[in-house]
Amino acid sequence: MPITADLADRTVAGVRRFCESADVETDLLAGIAARIRPAVPWDTGVLFATDPATTLFTDAHVMGFDPETCTPWFHHELNVEDVNLFRDLAGSGRVAVLSRTLDDPSTSARHREVMRPLGLDAEVRMTADDAAGTWAALELHREAGSRDFDHDEAALLAALAPLVADGLRRQATERAALAGAGVDGPGLLLVAPDGTVRPGTEAGAQWLSLLTPRGSQNLHSSLLTLSALRDRPGGTARLRVRAADGRWVTLHASPMCVGEGEETVVIVEPSGPSEVADLLARAHGLSPREREVALGLARGESTEQLASSLFLSPHTVRDHLKAVFRKTGTSSRTELVSYLFNAWYAERLFGSTAHDEP
């Protein structure tokens, strides 16, 4: 059924209200999907949260896919050249309908080898981006014999993308400030080729409980992402993800040994202050250059020192500083460090070197 202007407006308003009112514990992915589906129905789909620095998947809300589909899907997405890959869509603002990308969708390996055997035909994909990076990715499918995704549906998804990015970015700001509790040291997890996860150490078992998805239709998207990346040259990868207790943690993955079919070793540890600082800077919408200025500013560098290290004029540095203060709602170096990076993280990372605005 075609989307009416009223339905499109109500969908946009509903997603905006939901994202603006969500708190740190809200399942944003599930709530966003529920509000989109009446206007853009689908048979199967997935909405991912992504690390804005890498576009890799950190969380997912899966709708209708059999868990056995997840491992081949991740392999194709991360290791097989294809059309409309999320890493290629990132930052483009494009909503990609497969049938409008390819005259013959079967030339897509993802469609031919993963989706079509499941009886799926129509496909639409998009990412939710802002200046700081990509915060989410969406893939929807309809069964063979159903109508394709039309121009009005693609236009509505395009209108929703910045709202989704803003919701996830704001929630990341709140979550990054949570210190969490419990296990503090690194733990070891083992991921089998079929996606099965088991702890390799006692600390790993504790971390696994904190990385467990919220519902039966969710999955260990971060661990499956890392397991798939082991097939790339070098076979190692790292990823930031939010644990159930609110902390951001960093996952490091590498093959246990050379050879197809072996387990992937994943080391889990709390994200360091610099990683949390970077995430918070992105969550506040700072551009890459503004993030460099903010980090240097928090280290206590003067305007002249920043200008020298970044090969900028002092005037340009001051312009960037004004933008940083405006976007974070702060007015001095001390206030910025306290508000943006969290006093505990800033103290560990930078010591007491921050100065007032000159």
Image (spheres, helix red, strand yellow):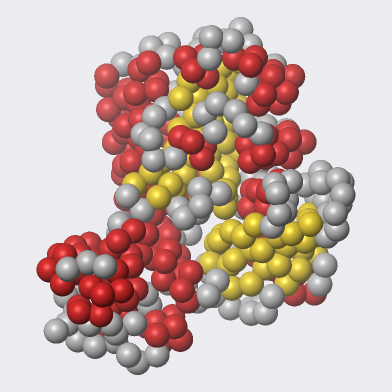
Does any portion of residue 213 appear in the rendered image? no
Residue appearing at x 30%, y 74% in the figure: 309
Residue 296's x, y, as percent? 32, 76
Residue appearing at x 55%, y 71% in the figure: 271
- Position of the N terminus, as image quadrant, is top left
Q: Is residue 21 above or below residue 160?
A: below
Q: Is residue 171 above or below residue 75?
A: below
Residue 103's x, y, as percent? 53, 9
Residue 236's x, y, as percent? 69, 57
Does any portion of residue 188 appear in the rendered image? yes
Residue 202's x, y, as percent? 80, 74
Q: Is residue 313 above or below residue 166?
A: below
**Left or right: where 28 falls relative to 130:** right
**Left or right: where 50 falls relative to 343:** right
Residue appearing at x 45%, y 53% in the figure: 52
Which of 311/80 is in front? 311
**Left or right: where 262 falls relative to 153:** right
